[in-house]
Image: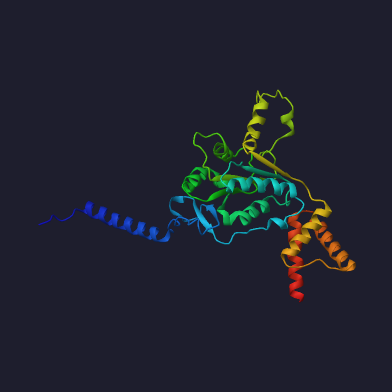
Amino acid sequence: MNAKPTAAETRWLKLLERAETALARAEWLLPEQPLPIDWSKTPAARWERRSGVRYGRGALYPVMTPHTVLLDRLVGIDEQKARIDQNTRQFVAGYPANNVLLTGAPGTGKSSLVKAMLGRYGKRGLRLIEVDKGDLFDLPKILESLQGATQRFILFCDDLAFDVQESGYRELKAVLDGSITAPPENVLIYATSNRRHLMPTFFHENFSQNDGKSEIHPDEAKEEKMALAERFGLWISFYPFSEDDYLAAVAGWLAQHEILLPKTATASDALRLEALQWARLRGSVSGRTAWQFARHYAGRKAVRS
């Protein structure tokens, strides 16, 4: 006959049963990791660390209807369009191409230009993966997950900038150029930023100081800040829009809403004045403001009709 469990053994058995019950409930509450992405059917994805995902691991989540932009609709940035299109065309064809840093004035089309590349080359195997600045630590995992894929991938980091105390830029710098691991041939990084060097620079850095707290070699600190941006092989700069550029952008976005410009001079002048007033109220003459006005105008016209 089996010996009767002791009181201590009984308590341990009950404790184990409670632990197993708690784990079973937690297992049921936590979602499974997403299935591997079928890149033949998925045009874009986003790397995310969703709350509740097991062990807090990041994963790629498919974006089946990405926001694509027609390249022809982007006006006032013809030189920038030509440069990024040439680089992307080389990349998609399997030829050498560069990582790209798009910097300059806000609302001038930096992000839209990257999205336009997906619309232009998606059918040729280009895929777009959005990676937030806070997830740059996961870049090695992302690159590992893309090994062996036949498609070509652009890792898109939008509005990229780092503060002095942040260290995520070191991971990005290593992936761009500085790691002993060779970067995959089917992956490039396209980043946008309002800062040319991605990190803040201060006026006092241009002068030598002897306050006992400053660095002995301040030039080395400045070079460290510039090191990340210099690892991008292609720099594309964007400049503030003129009023003519803005109005041309308005016409382009209205055309996307299938709205043609008025044929009469009076109606055309009225639309021009309304578009300029919209920009002045916003305090911004930019491509983004033009896109917002076009949505307002097209929606209002649709309601009235």
Q: Position of residue 88 (x, y in %)?
A: 62, 47
Q: Nearer the viewer, residue 268 or 200?
A: 268
Q: Quadrant of the N terminus?
A: bottom left
Question: What residue is at 55 percent from the left and 34 percent from the top?
Answer: 178
Q: Position of residue 40 (x, y in %)?
A: 50, 57
Q: Quadrant of the C terminus?
A: bottom right
Query: Please, which colouring scheme is shown?
Result: rainbow
In the rendered picture of this protein, how many numbered marks are placed on residues? 0
- The answer to whether residue 214 of the structure is visible from this angle is no
Q: Height in image: 11 above or below 95?
A: below
- The answer to whether residue 246 of the structure is visible from this angle is yes
Q: Position of residue 296 (x, y in %)?
A: 75, 66
Which residue extends farthest bottom? 305
Q: Height in image: 259 above or below 9?
A: below
Name the side, left or right, on which 17 lies relative to 84.
Answer: left
Q: Nearer the viewer, residue 83 or 243?
A: 83
Question: What residue is at 77 percent from the left and 72 percent from the top?
Answer: 301
Question: What residue is at 50 percent from the left and 53 percent from the top?
Answer: 60
Which residue extends farthest right? 266
Name the side, left or right, on which 242 lies relative to 156.
Answer: right
Q: Height in image: 190 above or below 182?
A: below
Question: What residue is at 76 percent from the left and 57 percent from the top?
Answer: 289
Q: Position of residue 23 (x, y in %)?
A: 36, 56
The image quadrant that residue 204 belongs to is top right
